[in-house]
Image: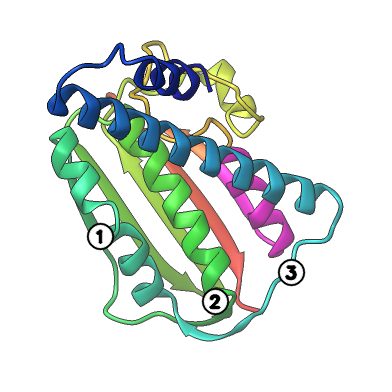
């Protein structure tokens, strides 16, 4: 809001001179407005989840396709950050689930991974005995073992180094609440060496 108000006032006052400077100011206002819009949407989602007013519409879907599409939407952001984004898993993974919410879980996990990854993010999907498992690995600084139980708390920050300016800080809380609403679980694990793995397990309804 500070950025939006400041640049808008500067433009109105004529303090931003030249077409290039005005274009840059407008781009910053638009980018910050999108971040604010995303924050409001995340807060509304959490409010609906808290009030048990969040709708789920499970149906037969190919989870592998949903995961690929949700992850591929982040390829431009990953390239801009210099991070390789890959999706591993079977060609198809038929389940009964809500594809919109499933895609939302993947998007939030990938967004979180891009915030901390040094060079690589890997998204995995698998099905086992009626359970859909999603995995998102990053090669970032990892998470202290003592902080693992808290990573899904709202606005909690546990990484030893600050992350990139990606997301709203509410994505993992939404992942946790959505997973629970779908009858599943969400967990974080420290990988050997450096890095973090987030795992979501959801029963096929």
Q: Which residues are magenta?
A: 172-187
Q: Dot 1 corresponds to which residue?
A: 87
Is residue 70 found left or right of 81 in the rendered image? right
Q: Nearer the viewer, residue 175 or 188?
A: 175
The residue depicted at 58 percent of the width and 16 percent of the height is: 146
| Labels 3 and 2: the sequence-earlier one | 3
Residue on which the image places disc 2 = 129
Is residue 9 placed above or below 50 in the rendered structure? above
At x 26% / y 79%, what residue is drawn? 91
**Callout 3 crowding tier (Cα within 10 Å): few <14, some 14–19, many ≥20:** few
Determine if the magenta segment contains residue 181: yes
The answer to whether one can see residue 195 in this image is no
Residue 26 occupies quadrant: top left
Picture layout, residue 60 above or below residue 181:
below
Q: Residues within 10 Å of mark 2 (few under 14, many from 20)?
A: few
Mark 3 residue element: loop
x%, y% of residue 77? 23, 44
Q: Rounded to the nearest whole Å, what is the CA distance between mark 3 and mark 1?
A: 28 Å
Residue 186 magenta: yes
| Label 3 with label 1: CB-CB less than 8 Å | no
């Amino acid at each position: 809001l500070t950025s939006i108000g400041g640049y808008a006032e500067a433009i109105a006052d004529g303090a931003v001179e030249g077409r290039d400077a005005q274009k840059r100011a407008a781009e910053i206002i638009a980018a910050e407005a999108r971040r604010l819009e995303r924050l409001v949407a995340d807060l509304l989602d959490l409010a609906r989840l808290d009030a048990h007013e969040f709708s789920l519409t499970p149906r037969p879907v190919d989870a592998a396709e949903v995961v690929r599409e949700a992850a591929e939407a982040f390829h431009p952001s990953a390239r801009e950050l210099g991070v390789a984004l890959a999706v591993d898993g079977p060609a198809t993974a038929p389940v009964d689930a809500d594809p919109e919410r499933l895609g939302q879980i993947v998007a939030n996990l990938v967004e979180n991974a891009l915030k901390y990854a040094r060079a690589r993010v890997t998204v995995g999907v698998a099905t086992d005995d009626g359970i859909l498992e999603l995995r998102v690995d990053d090669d970032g600084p990892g998470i202290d073992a003592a902080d693992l139980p808290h990573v899904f708390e709202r606005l909690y920050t546990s990484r030893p180094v600050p992350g990139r300016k990606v997301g709203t800080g509410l994505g993992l809380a939404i992942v946790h609440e959505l997973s629970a609403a779908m009858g599943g679980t969400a967990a974080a694990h420290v990988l050997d060496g450096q890095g973090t793995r987030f795992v979501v397990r959801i029963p096929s309804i």
